Amino acid sequence: MLLKGNNTMKCVELYRKGDHSWLAFGQDPDKPDALIDTNQIVITSGGETMLIDPGGSEIFPSMVAALTSRLPIERLRHLLISHQDPDVGSSVGLWRRVCGDNLSVHASWMWTSFLAHFDGDSAFVSVPDEGSVIRLGGREIHLLPAHYLHSPGNFSVYDPGARMLFSGDIGAALIPAHKQRSFFVENFTEHAGYMQGFHERWMGSAPARDAWVAMVSRLDIDILAPQHGLIFRGDDIKRFLDWLMTVKIGSGLGAYEKAARRSFRAKA
């Protein structure tokens, strides 16, 4: 269900049962053209809220307005930064200033001292490589390893009660704005064309891909939501996992061969 409000950033309800819900925010028409579009995910349970990949500082005004039009900001208890990219979490300092000391900021142990360059006063909760569990309103939200896809310190988020998976950059697609008719994949074959180049270049390890697909294939998943592009549901989840196993990862490696053919000898 697409939710509308006074803010321009769109919001779609992905799941709701009682006080337990998942919301996706994105497709902000007012964002600068130079910015890649991102999906921000909000989980609520038992009066507590968790924000996954809050976005960059440039979209903070739109995102905080969109969130507070749905939920009291005082309920925000947890912020997860799945990896180090600025489009994921460069707004962390702004969120901490709004939420104060009640906000726990979770990130891979690899990135906490790097993310401190966004906000040196944040007290980051380090996530070990094997992942961890965040307790939200009595429910368990699982952080699952997704290392080298694309970041060496990277996590997916699984909510077994809602059967929802946030996959981060896995499943991301670069879609022209005029093609964004919905939050959901409607034609998988067409959509795969928007994913192909991104996954060939940004995914860093075929063994990591294989391990991640094997791990999530054992989970009960009704919706798979990436950080960029459209959201998968129903049979398109298996279509995506099958497609991902066929991607030839590491297209940037050809640059080494080209560089090797160049001459680096100084000219007189």
Image (spheres, helix red, strand yellow):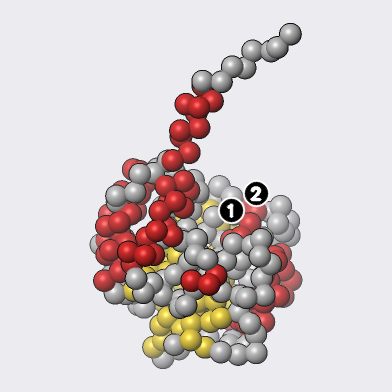
Q: On the rendered image, what quadrant is the N terminus found in? A: bottom left
- Compared with 218, 234 (above or below) is below
- Marking on residue 46: none
Q: Residue at x 44, y 51 (%)?
A: 197
Alpha-carbon distance for marks 1 and 2?
Answer: 8 Å
The x and y percentages for residue 16 are 41, 86
The x and y percentages for residue 54 are 60, 68
- Compared with 151, 167 (above or below) is below
Q: On the rendered image, what quadrant is the C terminus found in? A: top right
Q: Mark 1 touching mark 2, by CB under 8 A?
A: yes
**Mark sitting earlier along the chain (1/2):** 1
Q: Residue at x 65, y 53 (%)?
A: 115
Q: What amino acid type should be assigned to the residue bearing mark 1? A: Gln
Q: What amino acid type should be assigned to the residue bearing mark 2? A: Phe
Q: Secondary structure at mark 2?
A: helix
The x and y percentages for residue 205 are 40, 43
Reading the image, the residue beneath label 2 is 114
Reading the image, the residue beneath label 1 is 84
In-front residue for pair 113/156: 156
- Quadrant assignment, res 156: bottom left
